[in-house]
Image (cartoon, grey):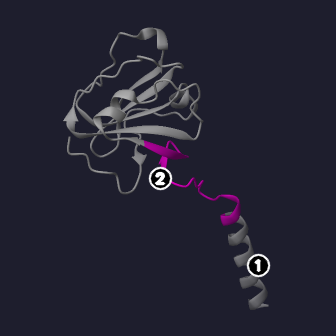
Amino acid sequence: MGILIIVTTCAIVLVFHKTDPLPTTPGLPVAEFGGVHLKVEYAISKEEREKGLSGRTNIPDDQVMLFIFPKDDLYGFWMKDMLMPIDIFWLSDQGHVVSIDQNAATSSYPNVFYPDKPVKYVLETAAGFAQEHNIIKGTPFLLKNLPIVSK
């Protein structure tokens, strides 16, 4: 009887684990934000940060771009050459949301968006992500082993 219970318990755990795997894409790390697992593309170099998501016609719902800066500052973002609206999340050096610009429209260029206070990271998603996943100030962006940027 004891063996049957152990086998049944193991089967339930395996089924649960099997139905809830983390997404995997070669080359892209996985993060968690607002209870959602996301594939992360980095913008680390000056050139990558300047280009960002411009020129793209689609941002998959499960993919984001994380801009990493060498120090906290009031980094400005604009919608130059953007083909679709996005949500912009301004993150502290600890990865918590300090400010959000939802549905930044392509027509807003040349206006520049700024955070409420200095940040080290900026996260861009498809427009509507903040509302759909109830992202608010203080929500953590969880990602292990962030790259370090020196310039």
Q: Which residue is mark 1?
A: 8
**Separation of residues labelled 1 and 2 (CA atoms):** 34 Å
Give the answer, above or below, for where 122 lies relative to 33: above
- Label 1 vs 2, first from the N-terminus: 1
Residue visible at 57% across and 53% down?
25
Q: Which numbered dot is residue 149?
A: none
Observer-nearest of 32 and 83: 83
User: Which mark's residue is nearer the viewer, 1 or 2?
Assistant: 2
Quadrant position of the C terminus in the picture: top left
Locate residue 122, reporting x and y percent. 35, 34
User: Which residue lies at the image location 34% right of the left edge and 22% below the top edge?
Assistant: 77
Q: Which span is picked out in magenta?
A: 17-41
Relative placement, left or right, of 102 versus 47 is right
72 displayed left or right of 36: left
In depth, the one of 37 and 85 nearer the eye is 85
**Mark 1: which secondary structure?**
helix
Label 1 neighbour load within 10 Å: few <14, some 14-19, many 20+: few
How far across and down, in percent of the image, does residue 82 sit?
47, 19
The residue wearing badge 2 is 29
